[in-house]
């Protein structure tokens, strides 16, 4: 992709956002619309999306593979060149939050965290990656987190969340290696948006240093700017909102 293509907003021509009604997902949709992306597939459990002529809402549930199969089939005629899984969970619906100690580990809660943060994005990749063209730039991204880094782990805790993101990062690396054999212009990447003012981070915002919290609109702009600069040589890595590589 040349610089002119980037500056004119020619890429992506078509994008698919899984988790389009969440804080970051909805902001990504709005930013893509503002860029002039021709088609934005906006996926949510209810099948809602921003109201715009370029938006095509669809319904999906990360826990129901059939809905992902149906979503991919719906996009087959207009395949996206950008797919982002913008969903994830830190605190469960019943209020169960990240574990501070191994003594708090619960297999049921762990299974729910892994289902949302690891298995769901893997299923999206399973059915969306085959839609990517082999002869042009495509990118599959999934929201990850710095706490999923093994090398950067200094304080421990948050066991299920950390482990689910570490597992996601490994899957993204695997997908990158596999696609590199057939889709040389395709990039697979984990995206760390920082601490964003969304429902996911809300229970933990009170202890944040001033200036560390980012609004969703800025987070979306940051992530898309990072995506613009990624190359196939970056495929398989995890990158933060500043474009810095997160350690494995």
Image (tube, grey):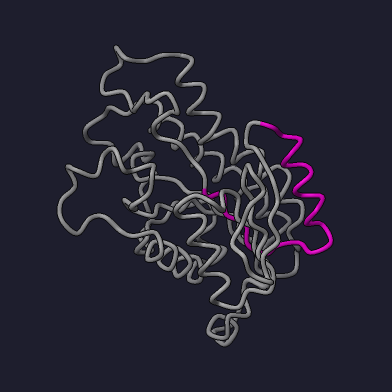
| Count of marks overlaid on the render | 0
In the foreground, 106 or 46: 46
Question: Which residue is depicted at the point 67% across and 52% down?
Answer: 179
* Horizontal relation, residue 63 to residue 86: left or right: right
Q: Is residue 149 left or right of residue 9?
A: left
The residue furthest front is 51
- Give the residue drawn at x 57%, y 63%: 232
Q: x and y percent of residue 22 in the render?
A: 49, 49
Instruction: Confirm whether the magenta stretch covers residue 71.
Output: yes
| Vertical placement of residue 101 versus 225, above or below | above
Report whether 237 appears left or right of 102. right
Residue at the spot 60% in from the left edge and 83% down from the top edge: 5
Give percent across and percent down for residue 54: 68, 70
| Residue 167, x across and y down, in percent | 49, 34
Q: Nearer the viewer, residue 22 or 142?
A: 22
Asked which quadrant contains residue 163, the reply is: top left
Image quadrant in which the C terminus is located:
top left
Q: Nearer the viewer, residue 160 or 186?
A: 160
| Location of the N terminus (image quadrant) | bottom right
Q: Is residue 172 magenta?
A: no
The magenta segment = 64-86
- Residue at figure coordinates x 54%, y 45% from the top left: 173
Is 235 or 25 nearer to us in this picture?
25
Give x and y (percent) for residue 233: 53, 62
Quarter of the image for residue 37 reads bottom right
């Amino acid at each position: 992709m040349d610089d002119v293509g980037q500056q004119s907003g020619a890429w992506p021509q078509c994008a698919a956002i899984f988790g389009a009604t969440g804080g970051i997902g909805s902001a990504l949709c709005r930013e893509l619309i503002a860029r002039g992306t021709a088609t934005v597939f906006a996926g949510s459990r209810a099948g809602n999306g921003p109201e715009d002529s370029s938006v095509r809402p669809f319904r999906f549930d990360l826990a129901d593979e059939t809905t992902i199969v149906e979503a991919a089939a719906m996009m087959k005629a207009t395949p996206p060149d950008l797919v982002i899984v913008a969903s994830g969970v830190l605190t469960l619906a019943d209020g169960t939050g990240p574990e501070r100690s191994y003594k708090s580990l619960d297999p049921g809660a762990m299974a729910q965290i892994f289902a949302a943060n690891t298995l769901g994005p893997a299923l999206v990749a399973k059915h969306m990656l085959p839609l990517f063209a082999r002869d042009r730039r495509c990118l599959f991204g999934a929201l990850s987190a710095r706490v999923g880094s093994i090398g950067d782990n200094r304080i421990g805790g948050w066991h299920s969340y950390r482990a689910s993101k570490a597992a996601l990062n490994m899957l993204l690396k695997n997908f990158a290696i596999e696609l590199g054999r057939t889709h040389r212009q395709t990039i697979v990447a984990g995206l760390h948006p920082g601490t964003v003012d969304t429902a996911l981070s809300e229970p933990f915002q009170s202890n944040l240093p001033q200036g560390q919290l980012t609004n969703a609109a800025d987070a979306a702009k940051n992530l898309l700017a990072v995506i613009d600069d990624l190359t196939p040589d970056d495929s398989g890595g995890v990158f933060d909102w500043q474009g810095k590589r997160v350690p494995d």
